[in-house]
Image (tube, helix red, strand yellow):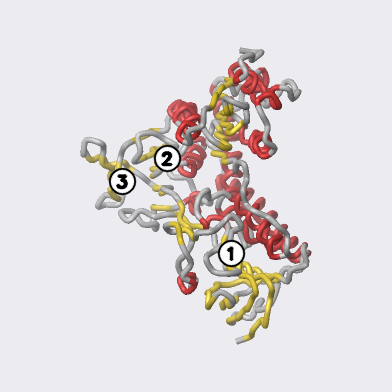
Amino acid sequence: MSQIEHTRLLVIGGGPGGYVAAIRAGQLGIPTVLVEREQLGGTCLNIGCIPSKALIHAAEEFDKTIQYAEASPLGIRVHAPAIDIERTVAWKDGIVQKLTRGVGALLKKHGVKVVRGEARVIDGKTVEVSATTGGEGPGEGQGERVRIQCEHLLLAAGSEPTALPSMPFGGKVVSSTEALSPKSLPKRLVVVGAGYIGLELGTVYRKLGVEVTVVEAQERILPAYDAELAKPVADALAKRGVSMLLGHKVLGLSADGEAVRVQGRDGSETALPADQVLVAVGRRPRTQGWGLETLQLDRNGAALRIDDQCRTSMRDVWAIGDLAGEPMLAHRAMAQGEMVAELIAGKTRRFVPAAIPAVCFTDPEIVTAGLSPADAEAADLDCISASFPFAANGRAMTLEATDGFVRVVARRDNHLIVGWQAVGRGVSELAAAFAQSMEMGARLEDIAGTIHAHPTLCEAVQEAALRALGHALHI
């Protein structure tokens, strides 16, 4: 067994949180080793955020050709559109590979040693790695065990898809990982779970011509979002011919494996024919199989409990990202990783963001930051809220994207903005404006008094603030 005598920071997990922490630590001159068992970039770059958005774009482009083959008000006509799914997946993989290579280059540039292999925690200062080939540091290519000792241990192992006891992954039952790299398209897809992952991928497959049925135990889609935001998405799914079975429980596959058995509110059972089943009922922190239990850290359910500096209950052991629970967002993990590196370097930081934006890349998209009107009421805040519809926005009309709206929530007494929500085509790009306004403590008057370029979707942000003040100009 070879052994690295010492490193100041050891990062377990090369996803967005882990690699950002390692890069920032390298910039600050902290000797750092990063351990990753698969590919740099983690779930987000390899089997999550990036590949899913690539397929969403490809499906959108293909869907346009289908629309143009039928009847386009723009006067565009195409004939017999078709898709080569293997080429589409290869294009998606090319984007992923470019990004992961870039992460590797940045880590190398900043002096971070990368060890490829399975990590196992021995104690709060020691980790053993069954090294594999492909690393850029100690143990690379040796296929042997490497013992790494550290002063600071950063846990960034991420999360994994949650399986259903009645329908474990395997065969025709797949997780989002397999759904993002199809070798061929099924004729009939059943999606279990109407959260953002299920609906994003269900929409992709429907646009590519697959018959899609979504089964959800709750009474409506996107239960994590308020009903007003979810309605335009539900309307769009229905218009596209996606079948929705709400308030239904999945019982498992039929005896012959050709259908999904579901139970309705009244107890009646239905069999849904399926060539493939996507189970998308959520994700859970990856806490098993790498010795984490030896540390006996405090937990919040399955997640590790951390404070506002990402410290765990053990001194000099830190945890970030999905391992620390909700919200499981790559940009949250990145911000936490950057902070931890700076704390280890002696800087003073705390993780107390005014808002962490979240985006649902359905069609139309949803973006939220801060409190919804219901959240504000539950928090006993006296707030006003106002919405501005894209139907009254000139740019939205030119994009054929008039469904949806922008909504602002602000305190009634001083007009401090406490939340933003939007649903519509391309609204994910409003996330920065929403979060920045809240981080800077903006009031309705600040947004209303800012000149917004015309014609843009962003004008709806200004108009929402104006409407909350009682004098919207274009409605």
Residue visible at 72% across and 21% down in the picture: 455
Lower position in the chain sequence, tag 2 or tag 3: 2
Q: For the residues carrying marks 2 and 1, which lies nearer the camera in this image?
A: 1
In what element is the residue under mark 2? loop
Residue bearing the label numbered 2: 194
The numbered disc on residue 318 is: 1
Question: From the image, which quarter does the C terminus lie in?
Answer: top right
Q: Mark 1 belongs to which amino acid? A: Trp
Specify whether 437 is left or right of 276.
right
Q: Mark 2 belongs to which amino acid? A: Ala
Specify whether 69 is left or right of 441.
left
Residue 211, percent from left and from top:
42, 37
Residue 256, percent from left and from top:
27, 52
Question: From the image, which quarter does the N terminus lie in?
Answer: bottom right
Lower position in the chain sequence, tag 2 or tag 1: 2
Lower position in the chain sequence, tag 3 or tag 1: 3
Q: In the image, is residue 344 above or below residue 73?
A: below
Q: Is residue 429 visible?
A: no
